[in-house]
Image (spheres, rainbow, N blue to C red):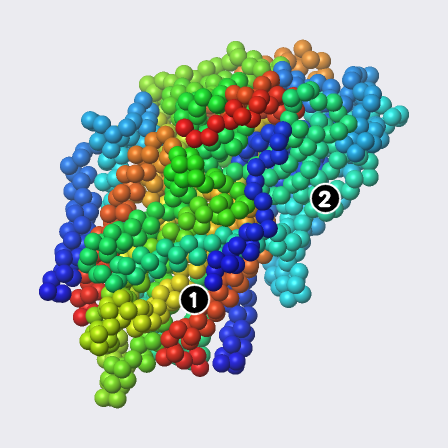
């Protein structure tokens, strides 16, 4: 009785192989929205970069560079002028003009707009379009990080925002257009007919959402998936490396993993305790054995790829003896059982539990007890926002402008205003990060952030753990992939698909 | 009979109300905030206040609850906070996939359980009994989340017989159905075996045997009928587990069903979407249970539906 | 002859469960390896001398973790099963015997709990309760009692119509006496079966709850959380999941045989 029902249910549907000439890329979560004014999640912006153009984008050297803009001027400290490239077209053939750019920004900034990106633009007073190829940003104050505001994807003038819900796709001028989006299942992109493509380049991309990490690896092993970035468990790389049809490449990345302290706790306000914890963590061993060497031990939030990076800061190599001495000095001697009167709560998610257990064991060696509290992400995130933790570890993804330092270390930037979740407060840091926002001269600004990085390493609001590599697993037949330090997938528009016949199945 | 059915249908209302109320209470009770989850790390306090106001989250809880109930009564489940799409539409898009998976899992469970349970119950103590029950124990002690990838490795990666993931033809359905149905199959087979084995020793079967019926015929004709009541009870009990199992199975097999929608909604604290999904799951469960109860009367006339 | 066969499953069941309990009690005293000591140089080490079952993703000895985990997994699941069966039987029995409105009310309450997705219930319980063993037991029992309530009620309703009940009633037996002398023995079979299967489910459910912040605190081992954390390594280090998987399987087998034997003893 049941079988006929099943057959009826199934009969009308076809299988899931991508069309010929399309690339299949497996991703772990569904993008939230394909309207660049709505999606704040990483996956929305990764896919959005292939569909939309922005005034500027972060390039392969981790610098802001013109995308729609052919040139950028700063005639006054509060004004930026973008001159658009000629001959730009949306995927329906309409030409893209400065009016579309102005519309995109205005619809975000309009009162009552539902765009969660509005908060990024508090310094933006107005966007003007004096002619078809010129866009002018006017700011309230001289604002050094202004180019970061120019990275929003541009939609055609008149496109309503979130009217039909977030899965409604907008038109863009990028190399691809959205063919279909089924939430939690797949996003299919096809070539924008008004953009030239190299011969052999993919005719489209199927982003398939595969939540289970083992299954993502299996899809690569079976040759179903052509490409995956940063979502394959490091322990599986060795296994995939043995498959002749696959190639694994590691590129230095800018994603920064840190351990944060909560300064509301008087014990953690003591610099000696923070430094002891930094010395007690064997970051090298964790990178080697838990991350399988897919990361670099970090000295600060900015990676060496960043134009504002300075490595001449205080370092904390693994040194449990030094940690022991610091804790003794701080007034926490070991008891008869070997433990000190120091116990901290470490909040994490299920994915972060293993790392937490490594910290727990390492801190245990210097007599600090760590109690691990594992919660699902919603609860964890709520706790972090409310400052309900002693220690926690998270990562910052895609930092290009160093003003992120102000968001995380300025004493006025506690949630919900900013990201200073540990309530770190140091007047010297406040002065520096404020100066960093208003210092326009690049070399003067570099000098400011050199001091910021040195102070952050001395005063330790975070223990810098590592910068994660971008790890790409792809078919050997795929050619011409160029990495971006921030993990952007923009070069998928230019890769060449080799003969599909090379795709092997099974061992 | 008709008045019984009417009474049962009416009794669905308090259950639905109970589930809805419990969901509302729990989702608002647990820590986390839909507005912060949605606006992410860059929200200004003013944005948070205005979004909270627009979503009605700044109103007293009682008020929100009343509005929510009013909406449900008028067939409006509201809009998802994170995607601004109507909850009813999101659910309608996903529900068929989950139903398909659940039916396939149930069918798979029954297809496995009946031959196994019968073979074991008809031959208690023999090798076939031990083998079948050993299989059942393996089935019940492997969680979905582990069985799924295991089946994929064997049947897809190593043997290349079946596709890995996705929703498509019948071949796409076999591994998820097996993953989902294995635990239920094991429990059913075990219960069937138990009932048959004890029925096999009962007087009426011995009488039938004495009358010259073969053992198999006696079991099929007399014992199976008696044995099936507890099996149906158990089936009703286990359906909740089957529905919950779809959540994990959908995650593993990238199956675009209601379970994944619920998981996403919970972690985003998307209140209207969580409430809609839970209500759908709960109604499915109680309606299927009602059908199970009605099936009792058909199978065992001694249980009168008053 | 028949009696003898039933004792075999009882004997094997008792032996298996007994061995597991013995391992839980004596194992950690014999294998004196710290189950919580990490050794990053030996992550995912395969079984071999020194580490007879290999090492996990943090280089901890799996044999030591299995033995220590037995204490938690067996202890928690036995207590939870006992609580669930007692609470479920009382509530289900009460509903069946009371009948009418009360029955209706109780069963609708059971429906609400059963119809509620366990995942959300667990998150909520994790928020209300905290980590730690007593809270874990409460949460698991709170989610587990309903199936026993429905089973007991259903069976009682069926038994009410059976000959021996009618006969006993005709002979003037009081409800309580009827329950103890006739109904309970008849119920024990299905209950034993359900409970013995429930054990495996609870050991695994414990892992799911620790995933949500309710459960055994890391780094303490339980079979459930070992199985769960080994899952990511199924392609490269299957021994991480095989060891706890086999342990859970043996426990389920043992309790099944035990339940089987007991059910026959009561039933006959």
Q: Is residue B168 left or right of residue C157?
A: right
Q: Position of residue B19 (x, y in %)?
A: 52, 62
What residue does disc 2 label? A162
The front one of A8 and A208 is: A8
Q: Is residue A442 left or right of residue A311?
A: right
At a point 35% along the width and 60% down the height, the residue shown is B114
Discs 2, 1: same chain:
no
Q: Position of residue A146 (x, y in %)?
A: 72, 24
Q: How many numbered circles are shown?
A: 2
At a point 61% along the width and 21% down the height, the residue shown is A496
At a point 63% along the width and 12% down the height, the residue shown is A447
Q: Position of residue A144 (x, y in %)?
A: 71, 21
In the depicted structure, whether residue B122 falls above or below residue B94:
below
| Image quarter of residue A242 | top left
Query: Which chain is mark 2 on?
Result: A
Residue occupying the far right of the picture: A131
Q: Is residue B93 left or right of residue C173?
A: right
The front one of B193 and A409 is: B193
What residue does disc 1 label? C110
Q: Position of residue C219 (x, y in %)?
A: 33, 37
Whether residue B275 is visible: no
The front one of A294 and A267 is: A294
The front one of B164 and C252 is: B164
Viewport quadrant of the C terminus of chain A: top left
For the residue labelled by badge 1, is the local secondary structure a helix, a strand or a loop? Answer: helix
For the residue labelled by badge 2, is the local secondary structure a helix, a strand or a loop? Answer: loop
In the depicted structure, whether residue B224 falls above or below residue B251:
below
Other residues around mark 1 within 10 Å, as few (<14) / some (14–19) / many (≥20): many
In the depicted structure, whether residue B134 falls above or below residue A339:
below
């Amino acid at each position: 009785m049941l079988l006929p029902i099943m057959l009826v249910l199934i009969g009308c549907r076809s299988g899931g192989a991508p069309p010929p000439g399309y690339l299949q890329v497996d991703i772990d979560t569904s993008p939230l929205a394909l309207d660049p004014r709505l999606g704040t999640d990483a996956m929305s912006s990764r896919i959005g970069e292939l569909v939309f153009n922005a005034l500027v984008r972060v390039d392969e050297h981790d610098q802001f560079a013109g995308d729609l803009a052919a040139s950028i001027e700063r005639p006054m400290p509060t004004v930026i002028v973008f001159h658009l490239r000629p001959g730009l077209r949306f995927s329906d053939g309409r030409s893209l003009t400065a009016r579309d750019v102005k519309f995109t920004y205005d619809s975000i900034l309009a009162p009552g707009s539902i765009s969660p990106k509005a908060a990024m633009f508090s310094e933006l007073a107005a966007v003007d379009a004096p002619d078809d190829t010129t866009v002018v940003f006017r700011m309230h104050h001289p604002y050094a990080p202004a180019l970061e505001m120019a990275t929003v994807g541009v939609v055609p003038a008149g496109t309503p925002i979130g009217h039909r819900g977030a899965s409604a796709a907008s038109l863009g001028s990028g190399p691809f257009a959205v063919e279909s989006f089924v939430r939690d299942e797949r996003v299919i992109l096809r070539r924008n007919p008004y953009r030239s493509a190299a011969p052999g380049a993919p005719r489209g991309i199927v982003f398939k959402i595969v939540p289970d990490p083992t299954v993502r690896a299996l899809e690569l092993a079976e040759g179903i998936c052509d490409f995956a970035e940063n979502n394959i468990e490091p322990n599986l790389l060795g296994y995939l490396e043995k498959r002749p049809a696959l190639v694994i490449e590691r590129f230095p990345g800018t994603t920064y993993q840190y351990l944060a302290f909560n300064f509301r706790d008087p014990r953690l306000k003591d610099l000696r305790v923070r430094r002891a914890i930094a010395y007690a963590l064997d970051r090298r061993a964790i990178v080697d054995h838990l991350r399988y060497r897919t990361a670099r031990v970090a000295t600060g939030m900015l990676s060496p790829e960043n134009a504002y990076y300075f490595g001449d800061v205080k370092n904390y190599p693994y040194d449990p003896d030094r940690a022991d001495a610091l804790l003794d000095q701080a007034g926490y001697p070991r008891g008869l059982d070997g433990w000190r009167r120091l116990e901290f709560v470490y909040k994490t998610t299920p994915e972060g539990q293993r790392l937490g257990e490594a910290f727990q064991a390492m801190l245990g060696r210097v007599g600090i007890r760590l109690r691990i509290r594992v919660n699902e992400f919603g609860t964890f995130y709520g706790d972090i926002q409310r400052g309900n933790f002693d220690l926690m570890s998270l990562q910052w993804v895609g930092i290009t402008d160093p003003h992120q330092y102000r968001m995380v270390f300025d004493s006025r930037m506690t949630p919900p205003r900013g990201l200073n979740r540990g309530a770190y407060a140091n007047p010297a840091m406040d002065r520096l990060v404020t100066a960093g926002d208003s210092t326009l001269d690049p070399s003067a600004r570099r000098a400011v952030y050199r001091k910021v990085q040195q102070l952050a390493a001395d005063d330790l609001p975070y223990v810098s753990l590592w910068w994660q590599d971008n790890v790409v697993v792809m078919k050997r037949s795929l050619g011409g992939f160029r990495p971006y330090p921030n993990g952007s997938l923009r070069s998928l528009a230019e890769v060449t698909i080799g003969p599909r016949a090379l795709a092997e199945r099974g061992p | 009979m008709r008045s019984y059915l009417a009474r049962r249908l009416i009794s669905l209302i308090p259950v639905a109300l109970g589930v809805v109320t419990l969901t509302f209470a729990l989702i608002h009770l647990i820590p986390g905030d839909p507005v912060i989850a949605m606006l992410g790390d860059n929200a200004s306090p003013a944005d948070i206040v205005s979004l909270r106001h627009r979503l009605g989250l700044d109103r007293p809880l009682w008020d929100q609850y009343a509005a929510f109930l009013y909406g449900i009564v008028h067939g409006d489940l509201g809009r998802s906070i994170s995607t601004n799409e109507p909850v009813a539409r999101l659910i309608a898009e996903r529900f068929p996939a989950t139903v398909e998976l659940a039916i396939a899992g149930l069918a798979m469970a029954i297809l496995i359980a009946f031959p196994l349970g019968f073979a074991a119950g008809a031959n208690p103590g023999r090798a076939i009994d031990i083998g079948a029950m050993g299989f059942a124990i393996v089935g019940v002690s492997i969680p979905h989340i582990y069985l799924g990838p295991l089946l994929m490795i064997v049947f897809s990666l190593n043997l290349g017989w079946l596709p890995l993931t996705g929703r498509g033809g019948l071949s796409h359905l076999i591994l998820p159905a097996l993953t989902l149905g294995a635990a239920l199959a094991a429990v059913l087979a075990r219960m069937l075996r138990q009932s048959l084995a004890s029925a096999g020793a009962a007087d009426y079967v011995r009488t039938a045997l004495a009358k010259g019926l073969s053992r198999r015929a006696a079991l099929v004709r007399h014992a199976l009928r008696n044995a099936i009541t507890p099996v149906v009870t158990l089936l009703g009990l286990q359906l909740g587990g089957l529905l919950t199992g779809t959540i994990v199975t959908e995650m593993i097999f990238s199956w675009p069903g209601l379970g994944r929608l619920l998981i996403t909604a919970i972690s985003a604290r998307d209140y209207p979407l969580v409430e809609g999904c839970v209500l759908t799951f709960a109604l499915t469960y109680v309606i299927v249970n009602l059908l199970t109860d009605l099936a009792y009367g058909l199978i065992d006339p001694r249980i009168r539906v008053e | 002859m028949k009696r003898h066969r039933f004792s075999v499953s009882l004997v094997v069941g008792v032996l298996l469960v007994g061995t597991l309990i013995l391992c839980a009690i004596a194992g950690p005293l014999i294998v004196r390896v710290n189950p919580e000591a990490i050794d990053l140089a030996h992550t995912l080490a395969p079984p071999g001398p020194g580490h007879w079952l290999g090492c996990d993703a943090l280089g901890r000895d799996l044999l030591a973790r299995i033995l220590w985990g037995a204490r938690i997994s067996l202890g928690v699941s036995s207590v939870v099963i006992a609580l669930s069966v007692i609470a479920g039987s009382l509530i289900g029995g009460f509903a069946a015997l009371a009948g009418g409105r009360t029955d209706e009310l109780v069963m609708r309450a059971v429906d609400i709990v059963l119809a509620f997705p366990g995942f959300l219930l667990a998150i909520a319980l994790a928020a209300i309760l905290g980590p730690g063993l007593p809270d874990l037991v409460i949460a698991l029992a709170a989610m587990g009692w309903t199936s026993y309530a429905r089973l007991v009620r259903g069976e009682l309703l069926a038994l009410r119509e059976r000959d021996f009940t009618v006969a006993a009633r005709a002979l003037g037996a009081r409800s309580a006496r009827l329950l103890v002398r006739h109904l309970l023995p008849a119920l024990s079979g299905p209950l034993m079966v359900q409970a013995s299967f429930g054990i495996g489910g609870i050991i695994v459910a414990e892992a799911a709850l620790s995933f949500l912040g309710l459960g055994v605190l890391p780094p303490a081992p339980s079979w459930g959380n070992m199985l769960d954390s080994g899952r990511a390594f199924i392609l490269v280090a299957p021994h991480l999941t095989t060891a706890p998987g086999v342990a859970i399987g043996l426990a389920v087998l043992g309790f099944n045989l035990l339940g089987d034997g007991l059910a026959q003893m009561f039933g006959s």
